[in-house]
Every structure is written in structure tokens, then in C-alpha cells.
Amino acid sequence: MAFSIVNKKYRWAYPLTERAGKPKGIVVHNAAATHCTAGDVHEWHLSNGWSGIAYHAFIDKQGRIYRGRPIRATGAHTLGAGSWLGICFEGNYDREKTMPKAQLAAGRWLIKRWKKNQPLKTVKRHKDMAGNQTSCPGKWFPWAKLIA
């Protein structure tokens, strides 16, 4: 499967902060919504009073990858981890038991690309980050398959 990253233009509520140095790693999330778009996530985050979409990428169930925040910007997706890159997967994997093959393949492709291009070694689930009380990316998220 061939993948590419779809660039989206967002209206940021506030200027984004540039990251000092290289990203420390990648944090994986789910949207906690069965059906949504990168634009929906951006609007939800604006309504929280944030600059906009907190993640650096959003992957929908069809396997399309959408750019969120620029790689050079700090993220707002994980408490205390603004220097990490964030990926959000469409879906609620505390309720949905399977991830579409195209979405999983796109996630594997993006992680491999970021690990090579940044370079990065560490990939964690949101729930594994210190101080974050969450089940994200969900009990049914195919973690082992994603990082295999």
C-alpha cells in the first residue's frame, strides 16, 4: 500500500510554539469517537480553548493520514510531553474491537517514516506517559501489531 500525508490548512487560535530540539518520541492516541475527521478534532480542541488540533497527525479508518500540527511545533496531546510527536487514530478502541487493516498499515508506515526521518526510537501509548490517567489508546487498540 502506498501512503502519503495529506496537508490540511488550519485556522490556529494562537501561534504555535516551536519545539526546542528534536522530538523525544511518538505518543499514540485514539480519538475516543467512532467516526470523526481531523477537522472535527481541530474544532473540538479549539472549543477547549487550545490553539487547535493537538496532534501532529490524524489517521482515519480508510488509512488516510492528515497532517495536524507541523513537526517543528510542540504538541498539546499529552500532559508534560509537548516535545513528543502525537498521532491520533480515528475510533474509540475502548469500544471498537478491531481496527481496519488500512488504518493499521497507515499507522505502521507513519511511525516507520518518523522513526527514520527524525530519528526517533521511542513509541508509547498515551496511557504509558507519566501523569496521564487514561486508557488511551484503548483496551482493544492493536498495539502489538502497530509496533511490530
Image (cartoon, rainbow, N blue to C red):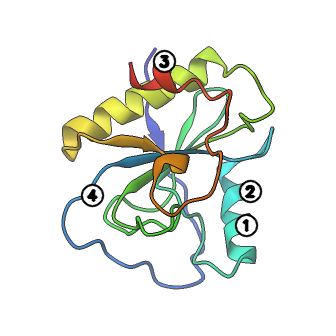
**Side of 36 relative to 143 (left or right):** right
| Upstream in sequence: badge 3 or badge 4 | 4
Under mark 3, the amino acid is Lys
| Three-letter code for the amino acid on which mark 2 is drawn | Asp
Mark 3 — residue? 145
The residue at which mark 2 appears reads as: 40
- Look at label 1 and name its amino acid: Glu
Q: Earlier in the sequence, mark 2 or mark 3?
A: 2
| Residue occupying the point 32% across, 75% down | 18
User: Which circle, 1 or 4, is nearer the viewer?
Assistant: 4
Q: Looking at this view, is 33 or 132 the one in front?
A: 132
Residue linked to disc 1: 43
- Please identify, in this view, whether the residue under mark 4 or under mark 2 is nearer the observer: 4
Q: Secondary structure at mark 2?
A: helix
Q: Earlier in the sequence, mark 4 or mark 2?
A: 4
Dot 4 falls on a residue whose secondary structure is loop
On the image, the x and y values in percent for residue 120 come to 23, 44
State the image coordinates of residue 130 (x, y, percent, origin top left).
Answer: 45, 59
Q: Is residue 54 left or right of residue 80?
A: right
Would you say the residues marked 1 and 2 are in contact, meaning their CB atoms lie under 8 Å apart?
A: yes
Judging from the image, what secondary structure is the residue with disc 3 in? Answer: helix
- Give left or right: position of 10 versus 92: left
For the residues labelled 2 and 3, the Cα–Cα distance comes to 27 Å
Looking at the rendered structure, which numbered label has been put on residue 113? none
Disc 4 designates what residue? 23
Q: Count neighbours of disc 2 (C-alpha within 10 A) and say few if under 14, some if 14 to 19, many if 20 or more.
A: few
